[in-house]
Amino acid sequence: MNEPNPFTSQPTTADLEARESGAGRVPTAPPGELPAGGGKYPVPHHLSKVGLVNQTSRTYRYTFDEAVRHSRQNAVAILRDLVIRNALMTRWTPVVQLSWSLIPSDPTDNAQVEGAAKLTKVIERTPKLQDFFQALLWGEWFGRQGVSQTFEWVQVFDEQWLVVRDFKPINGDSLIARWSGDWGQLVNGQYDGDKEATDRGYAHFYTPEEREAVVVHTAPGEDSDFYDYELAGQIKGSGLRGHVYWTWWFRANFQALLADFSERFSQGIWIGWYEYENAESKQEMENTLAGYKNNRHLLFPRDQDGKTAYGLEVKEVGTANPQFIRDAIREMDELLHSYITGRSLNEVDVPVGGDGAGLVEDRISRQVKFSGKRLSETLTAEWLPVLAKYNTPGVPPPRFVFNIDAPNAGEVLGYARAIHELGGPIDLDHLYEVAGLPVPAADSMVASKLQPMSPMMDQAPPGVPVAADPQQAPPQPAPPQPSPQPAPTTPPVDQPQPTLLG
């Protein structure tokens, strides 16, 4: 009987138990040379909670964040809120616009340098690369997010390159996490591949071969309380949705209160009068007031003397209560936005250079750096090894790095100006590089405040003497002094004294 191929088949229970203990995550070592504790967790995570669920599929419960646990409908509806959407796009758009590069692990190895250059061109062929990055960044919201890819071989010069042909996002709520760390995806009953029953229906767990076509990006994991086993799955990624859910829930309820207040009291409180102990009169008044909302007509009967048993009194409602509700909603909007983006809605944006993404220094840039570096770690661990395996076999894959810590062009130019005014030397080539400007060629048309260093069109540089300038002319011999004259006999007329400019 042929043994199952471990690369294309599902792991056995013994394999899963080994991975759950942590033994499957350390390099195989000879007996007697294992790491401390035998390379295992002292207590497997799924056994560190008061409850144990899904023993058959060995998966975490689907309630891995507060939103899903409280209301499945709200967990979906929260993304229809433009305050949430705006905050997420404010945080992620600068990340996907960052420039990036591949760094070989050994820059002195020509094979690794050439391999990094080749893989750079392979990645640049990915269609809608910014969308690829943004699809993965949704892992920060859900706690986990996947991207499923298809590949194709293309002819490039005399070589065959494996490139990404197409990709599709995998919603984070569709991903299933096993205790072992293996990932699966929810499927319906029509799926004809391997599938297992979970607490959310059927799921297909990826084989190692299929895993090469899937990139999974997760948020930082959190360990739930011992008694809160329903949230144990957030160890595989605790997303922003679970963090902001209850604040958003209170805000949604305050919005409902404001809408209800507007509907009930925007036109004041109406008090209608009808004939005492007359049920028919009361019903007529109710119909009249109800009809006013649709037809905007109020009709009250009266006799020839102008007397009537009916009447209407409108009392205006104060604005303090709705203003309080609006202020509370505004404060919660501010809190949600600042938590997601790391900045305040009322702060003035100060654009800085360096990465071309228009970041705001020391505020939103902190979240952009955090998101960018974590995404680059996922791409380095899950994406590049696959591309390198088929495009540069035998060469260690490089690291994917977003160019986040580039120099701040505005600050560098400001310091350079101050140093120049103090008389210090400045490296212009470096300033051109920091500012992202090309060095002007000899025949380029330029705009400059620098004075020419050679005479052009009857001009001379400062400090070069010319014949027409008596102050800059060389000294001449003193003229002979006239003989002394006798003092005049009449008082002299006052003459103006010469000045330095006379």
Image (cartoon, rainbow, N blue to C red):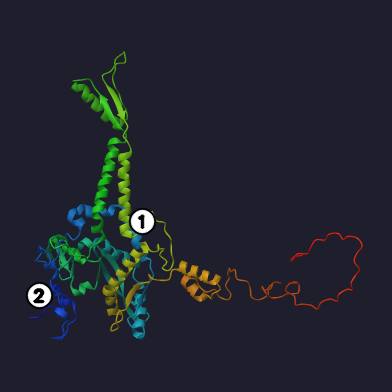
Mark before the other along the chain sequence, 1 or 2: 2
203 horizontally vs 467: left or right: left
Image coordinates of residue 74 in percent, x first then y, are: 22, 52
Which of the pair 331/276 is nearer the observer?
Answer: 331
Image coordinates of residue 452 in percent, x first then y, are: 63, 73
153 over 148 or under it: above or below: below
Image coordinates of residue 375 in percent, x first then y, are: 30, 69
Residue kind at label 1, given as amino acid type: Ser
Q: Secondary structure at mark 1?
A: loop
Query: Can residue 380 be seen at all in this image of the molecule?
Result: yes
166 over 281 or under it: above or below: below
Q: Secondary structure at mark 2?
A: helix
Image coordinates of residue 305 in percent, x first then y, are: 31, 13
Q: Which residue is mark 1?
A: 344
Q: Which residue is mark 2?
A: 14
Query: Can residue 186 be seen at all in this image of the molecule?
Result: no
Which of the pair 156/7 is nearer the observer?
Answer: 7
269 horizontally vs 278: left or right: right
Seen at 27% across and 21% down, the residue is 310
213 over 264 or under it: above or below: below
Occupied quadrant, residue 174:
bottom left
Crowdedness of circle 1 by 10 Å Cα count: few (<14), some, many (20+)?
Answer: some
Question: Nearer the observer, disc 1 or disc 2?
Answer: 1
Seen at 20% across and 57% down, the residue is 66
Crowdedness of circle 2 by 10 Å Cα count: few (<14), some, many (20+)?
Answer: few
Q: CA distance from mark 1 to mark 2?
A: 51 Å
Count of numbered marks:
2
Occupied quadrant, residue 112:
bottom left
94 horizontally vs 501: left or right: left
Which mark is on residue 270?
Answer: none
Q: Quadrant of the C terminus?
A: bottom right
Residue kind at label 2, given as amino acid type: Ala
